[in-house]
Amino acid sequence: MGTLTTGTLTIGVDIGGTKVAAGVVDEQGTIVATAHRDTPAEDVSLIEGAIAAAVGELTSKYDVAAVGIGAAGFIDAQRATVMFAPNLAWRDEPLQASLQSRLELPVVVENDANAAAWAEVRFGAGRGADHVVAITVGTGIGGGIVLNGRLLRGQFGAAAEFGHVTVVPDGRPCGCGLRGCWEQYVSGHALVGEAHELARGRPDRAAELLGLAGGRPENITGAMITQAAHAGDAVALQCFDVIGTWLGRGLAGLAAVLDPGLFVIGGGVSAAGEMLRAPAVAAFAASLAGGGYRPLAELRIAQLGPEAGLVGAADLARISS
C-alpha cells in the first residue's frame, strides 16, 4: 500500500440504514478520501461485506493504522459488540472481531451519536471545551457526553440515549415501546408531524410551505419546512418554535443532571440554525432549575455536518489503537 499523505491516518465508517460511508481521516480531523457502499440492512454477513469493501477500497491507496465504526445502536462497554441496532440486523453481533479478521487492522466500534459528539468536541463547535453534551436531532434523538474531556459511555456502554427520556408521562407512543419519549417531541419526525397538523388547520398561514408541497400538507418534508421558514412562512416558523421549545425544556433536564458548560446541537434538524436555537435558548433559561442564580450553559449549532460520525469514529480508533 502506498502512503499518499503524511501523519497517522485512520478510517472512520458511518453505517446508516441505506448507506455505508467510509473515509480516511488525518490527525486534524480532515477527510482525505471517501468510499461508499449501499447498506444491505437485513443481512449481517452482507453488511460486514459492504464495510470491508469500502474500507478495502481506501486501504488500497492509503496506509492506515486502525478503523473506527460508528453504528446506530447499543454498543457494549468494550466497544466490540453491537448489542442491538434498531435499523439493522445486528443482535449481539461481535462486530469488532468479525471486522478485524476481515480487515487485518485494529477495529473500534462506537455508537454513531457518540462518535459525532466526539468529533464536534475535538474538531468542531465544542473544540476547547471540557464539559460538553451533544444532541443529534434527526429522525430521532441521539447524543454524546464529554465530561472532563472524556467520552462518558456508562457501565454498559449505552449512556446518552437522550431520545428515550420520558418528557410527557403516557404521551405519544414511541418506537422503543414506551410513551412520551423526548424524541417524539423533538426530531425530524416531530417537526414534520407538527407541520402537517398546522398546515391543515391554517392553510392561509402556510402559503410558502404548501406551495413547496404542491398544495398537499401530507407531502411536506423537513427540508421544505426549513426552506419555507427561511422565506418567512408563518407555519414553518411556528414549527421550529414548537420543536425548539421542547428542545430547550429537555436540555434543562440534562443540565440538572450533567451541568455541562456547552450543548452542541447537530443532526439534520439543526440545519435550521438560529430558528431552532433561539426558542431552545429561551425555553432552556425558563426551565432550568435555579435559573437566574446559576451560570447558563451555552447552546451552539454543530459545525461538522453529516460527516461528524465518520470523523469521530476515525479519531476514536486513532486514540484507542
Image (cartoon, rainbow, N blue to C red):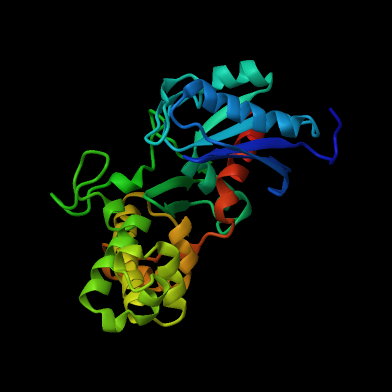
Residue 69 x %, y %: 56, 33
Residue in the picture at 40% in, 32% down:
85
Asked whether residue 203 appears in the rendered view, the answer is yes
Instruction: Decide: is 196 above or below 164.
Output: below
Q: Identify the image quadrant of residue 206.
A: bottom left
Q: Identify the image quadrant of residue 312.
A: top right
Residue in the picture at 35% in, 66% down:
294
Residue 147 x %, y %: 47, 46
Asked whether residue 293 appears in the rendered view, the answer is no
Residue in the picture at 30% in, 82% down:
205
Residue situated furthest left in the rendering? 170
Count of numbered circles in the view:
0
Q: Is residue 154 left or right of residue 205?
A: right
Instruction: Decide: is 50 above or below 45.
Output: below
Q: Is residue 175 left or right of residue 93?
A: left
Q: Quadrant of the N terminus?
A: top right
Q: Nearer the viewer, residue 161 or 287?
A: 161
Residue in the picture at 78% in, 29% down:
60
Residue 181 x %, y %: 25, 49
Q: Quadrant of the C terminus?
A: top right
Instruction: Decide: is 14 above or below 123.
Output: above
Q: Is residue 274 left or right of residue 239?
A: right
Residue 245 x %, y %: 30, 67
Q: Is residue 63 left or right of residue 127?
A: right
